Each structure stands twice: as C-alpha cells, then as structure tokens.
Image (cartoon, rainbow, N blue to C red):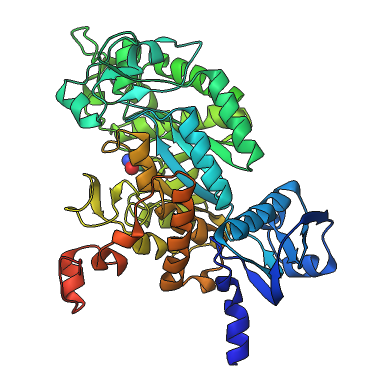
Amino acid sequence: MTKLILTLLMPLMLGLIPTPVDFQPAKGNSTVNRVVVRKPSRALRKATADLPDFSRKEAYRLRIRPRRAVIEAYTPEGVFRARKSLEQLQALGEVPCGVITDYPRFRHRGLMIDESRSFKGVDFLKKQMDAMALLKLNILHLHLDDSAGWRIESDAYPYLTEKTAWRVGQLYWDWEKNGYRFVSKDDPEAYGGCYSKEELRELVAYAAERYINIIPEIEMPGHSMEVTKAYPEVSCLLEDGTRVVGSWDVCPGSEETYKLFEAVISEVMEIFPYPYIHIGGDEAWMNMWSKCVNCRKRMEEEGYTDVHQLQGYLIRRIEAFVRSHGRQVIGWDEILETGVPQSAVIQSWRGVSGGIAANAAGHQVVMSPNSHVYIDYYQDLIRKEPPAFGELTSLRHVYSYEPVAPGMDESLVLGLQANLWCEWIPTCEHAEYMLWPRGFAIAETGWSPAALKEPEAFRTRALAMQDLFRSMGYNTFDLRTESNLARSGYRTFESYEAAGLKNPTGIE
Ligand code: ACM
Ligand code: ZN
C-alpha cells in the first residue's frame, strides 16, 4: 500500500509545474546530451487510450536516460510540451533518469490581460508568453478595448485608436480624476498606445510557435465610453436630438452600432486564427436605452417590454455574425441571462454560479470566478501590498480552486482562466508582479490531475519556480515575504481568527 502511494506521488518529486501525470524513476541523473523524437510507443498509446482528442494532442512520454532523452508524442505540440518539461528540469537543477507520461486535464489554461486600463505592448506580451509556454499555459486572452482606451487599429474605424488610444493619466484612477480625457498621441501629457495589425500578427505568430492561442476580446455593449466618444453615431439618441456621447453603453437600437462592431470583428478575425472571439457582454448599465429614440423603436419592432431584452438582441445578432464566419463567441456570464444560442461559450466571472447554470443548459464554459482567480485582487495583506481590488486572493487560494463544481458536466468545462484587470496596475512591472506566481497555480490546476494537487508541496515547487523566474528577469511577488494568513489560504482576518489561529496580522 505504502509503495503504491509512493509510486503515485513520484511525479511530485520532479519539481515541475505543472506536475506531470506519471513519473517512473530510474537510477541516477542525466546529462541529456541529445534529444531524440520518436513516434508514439505502445506504452504511450496504452496510457492515452481513453483520453479525449484535445488531451491526446498534447500528450507525451519523456524517457530520460543517463545521456539522452527520448520524446514520444502524437503531434508537434506534444513534443513541444515534453521539451518544456525537460527545459524546466534542466533549469531547476538535476535531471533525474526515468519516464514521464503526461497529458492535460483541460484544453483551456488561460490568462487574461487587460490592455485598455494600461497598455503593455509587444515585448511585454512576448515575455509573458515565454513564461506561459514554460508552464504549459495555452490561452492568452487580450481585453483589447474598454472605456479607458481602444488598443487595436481598425482600417474601417480609425478614430477608435486615433481618438481614444491616448489619455491623460497612466493610472486608471488618475484618468478618471482628470475627467476621462483622451488626447492626441503627440500631446505632451499623452499616455497610452495601441497595437498595429502588423504587431498583432507578429504576436499571433509568436504565440503559435509556443502553442499558445490568443483570444481577442472586443467588448460590448457596456464598458464602451471610448467607442461612443470616437463614433457618436453608435451612442443613444435622445428625443431632443442630442447624442449621449461618452456614455457607458453603445446603442443597441442603432444600425450604426452593428456596422461598427461587424466591421471591427471582421478585421479581428483576419488577424486572429483561433476559432473563439470574445465579445464581452458584462456590466451593461442600460440606463440610456429607455430614453433613446432608436432603442425604443427597436423595442417596439421586436415586441420587447424590458431594456434587458435589447442586450440579448445585440449579443444574439453579433453571435450570429461571428458564427456565420465559422467562429464561436465567448461572453461573460451576463450573456446567459438575456438569451444566447448554445454555441456561445459562457465565461463565469461573478463567482461560479453563471458557469454552473450555463453548463446545466448545455453551454461550454470557461471558469474564471472572481471568488478564486481574479489576480488583480490582493495577493497578501493590504498594508504590505500596492493598492489592488477585492479580497485576499493568495497563491494558496488560487490553487484551491477546482473548476468542475459538483454536478457539472466536465466535458463541457473547457478549463480555467485567471483575469488581470489593470485599473490598479499602471506598469508592466506591476502586471508581472500580479501574474506570477499566481499564474503557476492556474497552470497546475489546468493541466495536472486533481488527485495530485497538494498545497504545501505545490508551495515548495512554486518557491523554486519563483527563484527561476526571478533569475530570468521576471518581477514576481516574493513568496518568501508572504504572511501566514495568505499562506494559509485565509481570505480575511475574521476567517483566520475564526479558525482559531492567532497572530491576526499574519506576519511572525
Ligand atoms: C468582469 O470582471 N467585469 C468580467
Ligand atoms: Zn439607443
């Protein structure tokens, strides 16, 4: 029995993040002078016989011998994953001889980066993709537009970037204090930027070389102050003939709105090959719609009695447009409430309930609940950390997240994703600090078998990985300075004390 448990726990001894499915050790360490790639052996076929296609595609077997390593995989992607395991072992220290057999639990292992509230640029994204590849994270979701700035050039609608990609105030809250002012690129106070199509193609190619898929998000109908400023014709029209320029929501009553988003999404689909296009859909205020001539007309034509139905109308129309181009939409969980076809993927962010409801209704889901994987939230005590949102979402808390809630159909759970909103994050260095090491936990939950997850062993591996990241020039949060409270996974002083623990400051 003890021997069996030890065998099952062997993968944890390797120090890899994510932990591989299986490791059978052999005697000694390897110098790995040579790497050989072979077709899948009977052993790999047997180990992967029952896996779904997405998992088999990334599966590999890595035999480490005293002088060479032999990789078996079904696809170049599987070979790449094996190479990254080997690279990690070499970077972390000794490479033990033995056989690793490995494949992912989920197909979507992602990070979202908010480019609107602060603009990061090509070099930053490439650097984070290098880290993602090392950890077998495979989805980079880019939030490319929001009220604080539009970040992707459009030929059809050039004012989107010309008028709203530069602003006064690098920190989002300073921009708010300054009265939400956008300025021209040449203004001495200008902060911001945007991606050219060429740069985005370069990023897509860089991602593809690392088996990372980029999901572009074009947000609507809320979070759209910049769109209604750049193109007032997509804002609501009041009875006295005035436009609500700079309003939070675009106008779902106006045909101009569909013209703009369909043109932009067409340009986006030319750049990004991944089948999924994110269309936002969260936090629409809908406060102008009942006052708008065009919205009222649309409601009358459609027989609607409630403005919420207008959000459903807009989302369904854009979803149909995206689907007619052979792509699939992803939307934040609000889109479930106003009616959307089953082909839409629902991304749960207001906790897990949206994801559970969507799953029960037969939708594929991506789980990114703010209760667990919002990494713009504090990762340690408020008084120790730079200002952030929310509660304490420590490494241990992120790691504790299980994406498949009881009763959910796992085959419809595409995976999980951490979201890095950037209202409090004005620089690339700060963004990196929030991404790592919590991104390690996303990598492990997304790839490794749930049965192999153990928080203390993970922390030991995360410490070594953090040191490796720091030696590679990443500005990580330092786990060595983490308070007891955060380390224990408690979210508040109250919960810490309620568990009978002393020292409510959490620092010894
Ligand atoms: C969100 O955090 N508003 C999706
Ligand atoms: Zn309107």
Side (left or right) of 55 relative to 157: right
Closest to the observer: 373 or 12? Answer: 12
Q: Is residue 349 visible?
A: yes
The image shows a total of numbered marks equal to 0
Q: Is residue 274 visible?
A: no
In the image, what residue occupies the spot 53% across and 51% down?
109
Which of the image's four quarters has the N terminus? Answer: bottom right
Q: Residue at x 77, y 58 (%)?
A: 71
Can you name the residue that lies furthest to the bottom here? 1
Q: Position of residue 113 (x, y in %)?
A: 42, 38
Relative to 353, is 94 above or below?
A: below
Q: Specify the quadrant of the image occupied by residue 58.
A: bottom right
* Residue in the foreground of this view, choosing between 279 and 388: 388
Report whether 444 appears left or right of 67: left
Residue drawn at x 59%, y 31% as measured from the top left: 204
Is the residue 362 above or below the residue 329 in the image? below
Image location (x, y in percent) of residue 364: 53, 50
x then y, percent, for residue 275? 60, 36
Query: 149 or 456, which is in the foreground?
Result: 456
Q: Residue at x 19, y 77 (%)?
A: 501
- Can you say whether 115 is above or below 36 in the image? above
The quadrant of the image that shows the C terminus is bottom left
